[in-house]
Image (cartoon, rainbow, N blue to C red):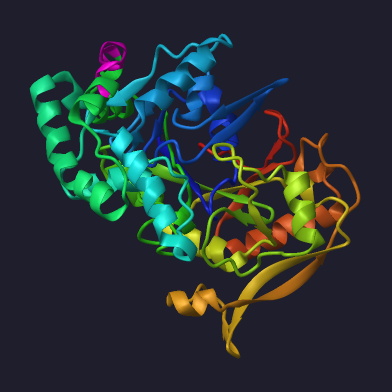
């Protein structure tokens, strides 16, 4: 059976958790392959709302094995807080697997993240302050701490000492902060070791065997294409690969493992933090989308920046990731808008760009070229077939499908688990 990757097609917060949950009773493994607790998924099951930050959304589906892959950075305090919160609500978390090669977020990572961002002033990136970037930096600099290091106290102490030798100079001499001791970090990490031990596994091997045994495996991205460290709006990006390449390196599998790539897009578009955003709205329409769409971060609570749908970005995501299917969420938010603009190209100093400019400066100065589509008044929440949507809503979806580079196979029309219309089988 095929492996399926679920990738954010915009700047994140598109509803990837809902897409994973949609497949829940047909899949066996869900792998989070990048990021940390700097992104969240919100899943609504009946009257229950679950906000996930570090755990894969498959943990809510009985029988599914959730996996934290080697490409993820793990804050153990957050991991166990999240597990405890779910278990208090009757969710079984005993199937969770954690890669032995995943890197660990420590107290010095979060401290450096926060003080560095404040030090940047008006040049801030807009990080969540959760230590994600500094942890990935240590990984690349080869001074990181991995999950497996926690089970060898001598190695763990040596690695903490090596990291703090450099970081304390930075904290004390540049940021005027106190030095962090080896003992406080060591003790912080050791409090979780025995509880963590049974969860740790050779996850690439387990996933390889699962696929060989015809199990269905979903690879779930944190963040999204436009926040990818290579392919996003650098430097206003995350610190990991949120695109299809990250699904492979972040889970330890080869390209033959993934047969379908599902891109998730909203019927409009949002982003958080700093960085260019051509269709951003600063008027009452932006406020309307934010309020109707509940555009406040699952992890941070920050109000998201909002804008009209951007077709060149969707095409870009389709190309970068090899998207086979799009899932479009929050179509219901647009009900009652008389004319709905869609960005079809950009104007950069009088030059038309039908695709995303490769030059960051051009993209920063890009002005959207809009095509308007007639809206609809009807409430969409009860529709379960595409034909049950108002004619103008159908036309809007079909127009975006034509512009976006892949078929739109499912459409979200509300926050609940069953408020989704399937046009094509996402696994077939």
Q: Residue at x 27, y 33 (%)?
A: 102
Main secondary-structure element of the magenta-colored stretch: helix
Q: Residue at x 47, y 78 (%)?
A: 361
Q: Is residue 221 above or below residue 235?
A: above
Which segment did they paint magenta?
189-198
Q: Position of residue 68 (x, y in %)?
A: 36, 29
Q: Nearer the viewer, residue 214 or 323?
A: 323
Q: Can residue 139 be found in the magenta stretch?
A: no
Instruction: State the image quarter where residue 232 is shown.
Output: bottom left
Image position of 265 with respect to 308: above or below: above
- The residue lying furthest to the bottom in this view is 350
Q: Position of residue 417 (x, y in %)?
A: 67, 28
Most foreground residue, 367 or 244: 367
Residue 254: percent from left, percent from top: 26, 42
- Give the residue drawn at x 53%, y 33%: 20
Where in the figure is residue 52, as x and y percent of width and height? 53, 29
Image quadrant of residue 426? top right
Any part of residue 105 in sight: no
């Amino acid at each position: 059976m095929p492996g399926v990757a679920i990738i954010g097609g915009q700047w994140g917060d598109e509803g990837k958790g809902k897409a994973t949950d949609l497949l829940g009773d047909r899949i066996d493994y869900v792998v989070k392959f990048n990021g940390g607790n700097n992104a969240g998924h919100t899943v609504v099951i009946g009257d229950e709302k679950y906000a996930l930050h570090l755990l894969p959304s498959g943990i809510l589906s009985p029988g599914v094995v959730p996996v934290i892959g080697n490409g993820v950075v793990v804050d153990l305090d957050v991991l166990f807080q999240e597990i405890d919160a779910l278990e208090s609500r009757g969710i079984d978390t005993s199937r969770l697997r954690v890669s032995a090669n995943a890197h660990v977020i420590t107290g010095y990572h979060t401290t450096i993240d926060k003080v560095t961002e404040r030090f940047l002033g008006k040049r801030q990136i807009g990080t969540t302050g959760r230590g994600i970037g500094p942890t990935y930096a240590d990984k690349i600099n080869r001074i990181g701490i991995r999950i497996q290091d926690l089970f060898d106290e001598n190695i763990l102490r040596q690695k903490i000492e090596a990291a703090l030798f450099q970081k304390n100079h930075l904290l004390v001499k540049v940021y005027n902060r106190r030095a962090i001791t080896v003992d406080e970090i060591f003790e912080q990490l050791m409090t979780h070791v025995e509880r963590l031990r049974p969860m740790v596994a050779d996850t690439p091997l387990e996933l390889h065997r699962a696929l060989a045994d015809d199990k269905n495996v979903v690879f779930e991205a944190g963040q999204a294409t436009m926040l990818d460290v290579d392919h996003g709006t650098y430097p206003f990006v995350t610190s990991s690969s949120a695109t299809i390449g990250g699904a492979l390196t972040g889970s330890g599998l080869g390209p033959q493992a993934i047969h379908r790539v599902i891109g998730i897009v909203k019927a409009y578009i949002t982003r958080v933090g700093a960085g260019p955003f051509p269709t951003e709205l600063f008027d009452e329409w932006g406020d309307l989308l934010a309020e109707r769409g509940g555009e406040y971060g699952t992890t941070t609570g920050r109000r998201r920046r909002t804008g009209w749908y951007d077709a060149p970005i969707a095409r870009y995501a389709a190309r970068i990731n090899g998207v086979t299917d799009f899932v479009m969420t929050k179509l219901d938010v647009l009900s009652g808008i008389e004319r709905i603009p869609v960005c079809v190209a950009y104007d950069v100093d009088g030059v038309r760009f039908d695709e995303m400019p490769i030059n960051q400066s051009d993209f920063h100065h890009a002005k959207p070229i809009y095509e308007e589509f007639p809206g609809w008044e009807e409430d969409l929440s009860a529709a379960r077939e595409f034909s049950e949507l108002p004619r103008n809503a159908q036309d809007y979806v079909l127009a975006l499908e034509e512009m976006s580079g892949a078929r739109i196979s499912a459409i979200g029309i509300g926050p609940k688990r069953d408020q989704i219309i399937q046009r094509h089988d996402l696994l077939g």
